[in-house]
Amino acid sequence: KAGLVLSDGTTIDDLIDLKMNEVSLRVMNDPELHRFEMERIFARTWLLLGHDTEIPKPGDFVVRDMGEDQVIVARSRDGGIHVSLNVCPHRGMKVCTAEAGNTQVHRCIYHGWAFRPDGDFIGAPIEKEQMHGNKRTKSELGLKKARVHLYGGLIFATWNIEGPSFDEFLGDSKFYFDQLFCRTDSGLELLGPPQRFMIPANWKIGSEQSASDGFHTLTLHRSLMEGGVMGGTPESIYDNAPGMYGVDVSCTEGHSLRCLEAAQTFKMFSNVSFEGKTTEERLHLLPPPGITPELIPQLFKNLSPEQVDMLATIPPQVGGMFPNVLVLFIFAPRTDGGSSGALALHTYIPRGPDHFEFVNYIFAEKDAPEQVKRDMLQNSIQQAGTSGIIEQDDADTWPQIMRNTKGPMSRSITLKYQALHGHEKPEGWPGGGLLYPGFTKDDTQWNWWLNYHRLMSAS
Ligand code: FES
Ligand code: FE
């Protein structure tokens, strides 16, 4: 018997049919299941909270969310980054009511208890009156602290203090994600505060799509192909299905990536071929999004030869990090025939079972010229988010699925993940994970659900 039973007797196996590869639509709108998700997923796994370039100076902070728990992400005097629950241990007020700022003292506005950026308790007003009593020591009165890990400057945290390390969480996806986040000497820079949009849909509707749903692009984003924004020609969208052939990768913990041939992307912009070209020549012909010719030597320095070759030839372009991150690393055509790019990460933050907050982090390489950073910012804003030319389609669809979670008939419908390849390692493929070469199918998304099922079953 699976380890999750709802109060009406429904088990996780009733909701996720492992034999039929089907998921009940009910999972997208159920308050009880939502509480289990907060406890068994969001309070246990590593979660993305931002980037260290957002808080460069001691005292800098941003307020972010770990599921439904709000946290303060702050830099202390010694340069360390700390993540603390934004709940005052006195009477439960938010300690920090701003979204971002700089301070060495976070003072609760209710009665004035004060905390350092690392979450330690400093004291309560009127010290001689001991307004924090004497039953607990000061060291017991700090904010609840999460465990923090920096990866390529990305700030991750978890409440699972004794649980798997971040490296274990990243597992075999590290080989691929390094190519996006750890490839230059100075690393990435976040371009401004993230964009935020509220979506009237469950967080999983966005997140399971992040697990490499390439299929929807052909139909939902068809107008982009017709407009020449995503490559392909309108007549041949279903025949040559641009962007559907590549290698889909499913990694540890439900992370996934779609590696698409740069030459295929390149054909959308130009007729020059990659044939017979060295890795370096390929990189110069079609630099990966965000990389300029001056940055190419840094790729060889920071990555293994296999990683650089993949980045030049069949780079990861879109994917997801379990539970709620979308990775977008895309080539963008320029009107002069060249290509530019966008590198954005989204987090889908649960806001109850029926809403999520879509947070869009936009990046460029710190060492890139200012003009490239402006291009990257412009591309990401133009393409992503509820008003982006690509993602407005998704942002329109998700709430319509959500609308269908309410009626008793609709809730009994199951979502189908039955177009499966089975994994198979292509000859000479240098990376790990379960590999699905060829036409993109449902495998990586089904693996996302398997990981969801695993975590939700563990009491
Ligand atoms: Fe924060 Fe009282 S609730 S000081
Ligand atoms: Fe989409």
Image (tube, grey):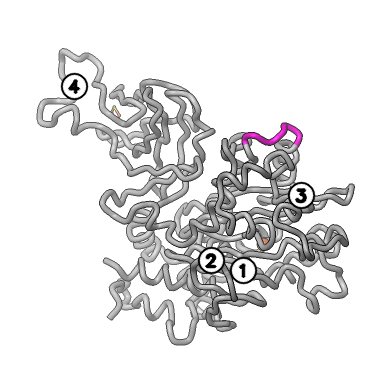
Identify the residue at horizontal 65%, vertical 48% (top origin): 343
Mark 4 vs 2, N-terminal side: 4
| Residue that carries the numbered disc 2 in the rendered image | 208
The numbered disc on residue 213 is: 1
Identify residue type, mark 4: Met
Can residue 429 be seen in this snapshot?
Answer: yes
Q: Give the percent coordinates (x, y) of residue 326.
A: 57, 56
**CB within 8 Å, label 2 to label 1:** yes
Rounded to the nearest angstrom, the CA distance separating label 2 from label 1 is: 8 Å
Rounded to the nearest angstrom, the CA distance separating label 3 from label 1 is: 30 Å
Can residue 109 be seen in this snapshot?
Answer: no
Would you say 32 lies left or right of 250 here? left
| Residue that carries the numbered disc 3 in the rendered image | 284
Identify residue type, mark 1: Asp
Would you say 334 lies left or right of 161 here? right
Residue range of the region highlighted in magenta in the rendering: 366-371
Q: Give the percent coordinates (x, y) of residue 363.
A: 62, 42
Quadrant where the C terminus is found in the figure: bottom left
Mark 3 vs 2, N-terminal side: 2
